[in-house]
Image (tube, helix red, strand yellow):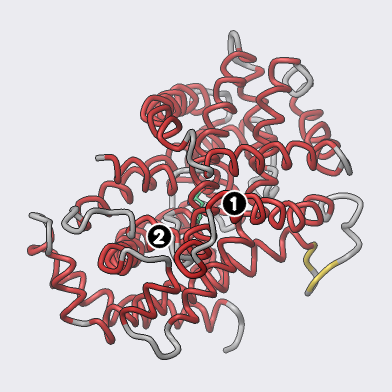
Amino acid sequence: MGFILAAAGSAVGLGNVWRFPYVTGENGGGAFLLIYLGIVFSIGVSVLVAELIIGRSTQLDPAGAFRKLAGGAWPIVGYMSILTAFVILSFYCVIAGWTVAYMIKSITGSVLTANPEDIGGVFDAFITDPLEPVLYTALFIGLTVFVALGGVASGIERAARILMPALFVILLVLVARSVTLDGAVEGIAFFLEPDFSKVTWETLLAALGQAFFSLSLGMGAMITYGSYMQRHDDIAGSALAVTVLDALVAVLSGLVILPAVFAFGAAPTAGPGLTFITLPSIFAQMPFGFLFAALFFFLLAIAALTSAVALLEVVIAYFMDEGSANRKKVAVTAGIATFALAVPASLSLGVMSGFTIGGKVLFDALDYLTNNITLPLGGLLVALFLGWVLKHRGEEEFVDGSTLAPALVGAWRFIIRYVAPVAILLILINGLGFI
Ligand code: PHE
């Protein structure tokens, strides 16, 4: 149970509430949702199992795990994971900083009192400011390092046991409010009625990347968490529970954000600001909206914190397992390095927006590089590793400790050997425009 909570804490975060709704909005709605769920419950859950197997069987960080199991060039997959975790952490903390800021601003009133049209302006003014969001980012990175230092790690786990169900309940309340807004019907249809004419290879790549991001896959987090599992903990059962929870939170978030987008006349293609523009409009229409808002952003910030801790843990585990460095030194150094990348990422949305990489400002470039390239690539290599290198050894690990697994091992083997590698490769090549 403890492991499931920790892994779910890593999976459920900004990816579900902030990223999923706007990526769905950008990719045409209903068809994207179906494709996303299809990927999550085939490739996603199977790669999650694979990563937990690598971690549990070696009890090591990603690079060490690959070295122990196979050696050769395989540890490079681990190094790539660690670098990816670091890059994701940097822009993740920027968004998490916005969440903390909105929690505070909900009470001081500065984000809720504006009318719906002004809310977008308030948001833009905030994220493009050269100082304010950077301070909130620093605050959030500080919190993450503090939790990772261990003193409060068990405290946050205990707190998350109460706070995560609370986030779930408040999401349900928000769904009820959002779908009953005037004009919400159009948004519900957008989200739930698939229109396959909008599907391209880019849509598939976006769904694949979002699935890996949301399940914390392709970058070593679940290998690292798997290494903290007991030798005979149930991998299949845990993976399934985490996947169902994670998908549920994403769908609920979509049902909050997208109906409201249409009700308030915003554009579903608005991008990364979508959640922050829409939610305040919903809260502004609720009795005691400011209290709901503060509570919601607080719970979201905690969900982001348990995810950020998982990302930082990948880096910490690597330096501790490989170089036997001490936790405190690694955590603080990694925190400072994260901040050094987070600052330009944040500024790239404002004063530094003139500086672009391949037509993208730094924030978007970091997001694209990880979600659309290194996460799918990491997932592909993990699948190949389990399916073609570990083979029977992996299957023995899969059934060890699980009552559910023997019935699923055939399907899992098939997905991990054939479906996942072929699908990921096709989507990557076509989605990136190589063909
Ligand atoms: N899964 C987290 C989320 O959806 C983000 C994350 C990615 C956390 C990778 C850890 C590792 O918010």
Name which residue lies at 55% across and 25% down: 296
Image-based side of 155 in relation to 87, left or right: left
Badge 2 density bin: few <14, some 14–19, many ≥20, Cα 10 Å:
many
Give above or below for 183 relative to 410. above
**420 or 362, which is in the foreground?**
362
Give above or below for 94 relative to 433. above
Give above or below for 67 relative to 363. below
Image quarter in which the C terminus is found: bottom right
Give above or below for 208 relative to 339. below
Name which residue lies at 41% across and 61% down: 35
Q: Quadrant of residue 183?
A: top right
As shown in the figure, which amino acid type bears the numbered disc 2?
A: Thr
**112 or 147, which is in the foreground?**
147
Looking at the rendered structure, the secondary structure element under dot 1 is: helix
Label 2: which residue?
224
Name which residue lies at 33% across and 60% down: 227
Name which residue lies at 39% across and 80% down: 67
Label 1: which residue?
331
Q: Quadrant of residue 294?
A: top right
As shown in the figure, which amino acid type bears the numbered disc 1?
A: Ala
Queried on whether the Cβ of the residue with tag 2 lies below 8 angstroms from ligand 1, the answer reads no
Looking at the rendered structure, the secondary structure element under dot 2 is: helix
Frontmost of labels 2 and 1 is 1
Residue 272 visible in rendering:
yes
Q: Position of residue 36 (x, y in %)?
A: 42, 58
Q: CA distance from mark 2 to mark 1?
A: 15 Å
Image quarter in which the N terminus is found: top left
Image-based side of 293 in relation to 50, left or right: right
